[in-house]
Image (cartoon, grey):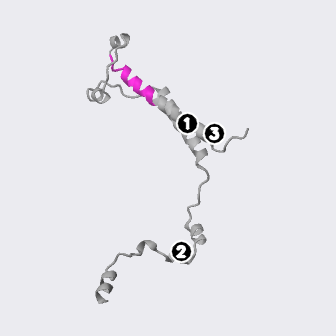
Amino acid sequence: MITPPHLPGKILSLVGLLVLAHSAYSTYERKISFCIPENTLETKVHHDVDLSYLKAAEKLENGLPADIIFECLLGVLIFMFGFTLVSGSLKPILMEIEMSKQTIAKFDSRPSFQTFNHRGVHLHSKAN
């Protein structure tokens, strides 16, 4: 079976995005778990906790554990590698190569400067 050329890159990009999403969810869960009292967690009663309020009240802990940071960096690296495989070849940025492909007539034409709605129509209609 022949695989399309971009399939491994797409799969790696998807895996990288999933790892990033999991690290974001882990970060959110960690921030919430330090803010909710333990008796609330035991009774399975969940309250909507506003992170901006907790941050303003200085009830949030600073920093993340190393495993979440590692997971986030790993997700970024996997996504970047997969995206590089999908993106294809790069084009040269030298202007000389592009200029050699064009004719002088193409450089001289400026269709955006042509105006067909000008006062000449009104001047010629009054003269006739």
Q: Is residue 35 left or right of residue 5?
A: left
Which quadrant would the C terminus be assigned to in this image? bottom left
Q: State if disc 1 and disc 3 touch (CB < 8 Å).
A: no
Q: On the image, numbered disc 3 is attached to which residue? A: 8
Q: Determine if the magenta segment contains residue 70.
A: no
Dominant SS type (magenta): helix
Residue 42, how many percent across, how many down? 37, 10
68, 81: nearer the viewer: 81
Dot placed on the residue nearer the N-terminal end, 2 or 1: 1
Tag 1: amino acid: Leu
Secondary structure at numbered mark 2: helix
- For marks 3 and 2 on the same chain, the one whose residue lies earlier in the sequence: 3
Residue 71: % across, % down: 51, 30
Task: Name the quadrant of the N terminus.
Answer: top right
Relative height, residue 48 to residue 45 (above, below): below
Q: Which residue was labeled with disc 2?
A: 106
Above or below 124: residue 99: above
Numbered badge on residue 14: 1
Q: Percent from the top left, x then y, of residue 126?
A: 28, 86
Residue located 58% across and 69% down the image? 96
Toward the viewer: 116 or 40?
116
> From the viewer's perspective, is residue 120 above or below residue 99?
below
Assess disc 3: are there few (<14), some (14-19) or many (≥20) residues with their C-alpha within 10 Å of its C-alpha.
some
Residue 44 location, x and y as percent?
37, 13
Q: Amino acid at mark 3?
A: Pro
Q: Which residues are magenta?
A: 24-36
Q: Residue furthest bottom?
A: 127
